[in-house]
Amino acid sequence: MYFTVQLILQILVSDMIEVSLYAVGSVFSTILTVLSISAYRKSGLKKLKYAIVAFALFSGFLIYEILESLLSLDNEFTDIIIPSSALVILIFLFLTVIKRT
């Protein structure tokens, strides 16, 4: 009985830590998106557009992860959305680095 209670408490704590990390990451990526938009407006540097898209996608990705954790979203699209999002984010960050203008 005691082991079962400990296991349940451990699962709940780990879920709360997971959601908290997703929340902090989504807030941070949203801040980075806003800062990138501000930097783009001030400098006009075109490659910042790729960074803006990457940070915005990462923010959306983390918000989706929060919703998936809290609402137990378990559908066939989740297994496609998560790796696809990560791939697209990496592509945009790569484009940010390699673009000349």
Image (spheres, rainbow, N blue to C red):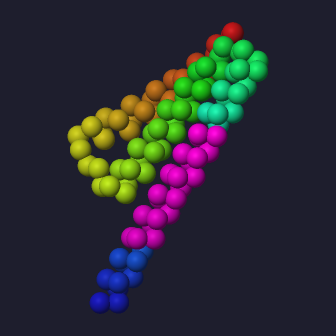
* Occupied quadrant, residue 6: bottom left
Q: Residue at x 59, y 39 (%)?
A: 30
Q: Residue furthest top?
A: 101
- Residue nearest the observer in this picture, 40 or 2: 40
Q: Residue at x 64, y 40 (%)?
A: 31
Magenta residue check for 101: no
Q: Residue furthest right?
A: 43
Q: Residue at x 52, y 39 (%)?
A: 59
- Side of 54 relative to 70 (left or right): right
Report the quarter where the C terminus lies: top right
Residue 49 screen position, x and y as percent = 61, 20
Report the quarter where the N terminus lies: bottom left
Magenta residue check for 21: yes
- Side of 1 relative to 101 (left or right): left
33 over 50 or under it: above or below: below
Predominant secondary structure in magenta?
Answer: helix
- Side of 53 relative to 43 (left or right): left
43 over 37 or under it: above or below: above
* Occupied quadrant, residue 76: top left
- Residue nearest the observer in this picture, 43 or 6: 43
Residue 68 screen position, x and y as percent = 35, 50
Magenta stretch, residue numbers: 11-31
Residue 82 screen position, x and y as percent = 38, 38
Q: Residue at x 50, y 63 (%)?
A: 17
Count the labels in the image: 0
Residue 72 screen position, x and y as percent = 30, 55
- Residue nearest the observer in this picture, 12 or 1: 12
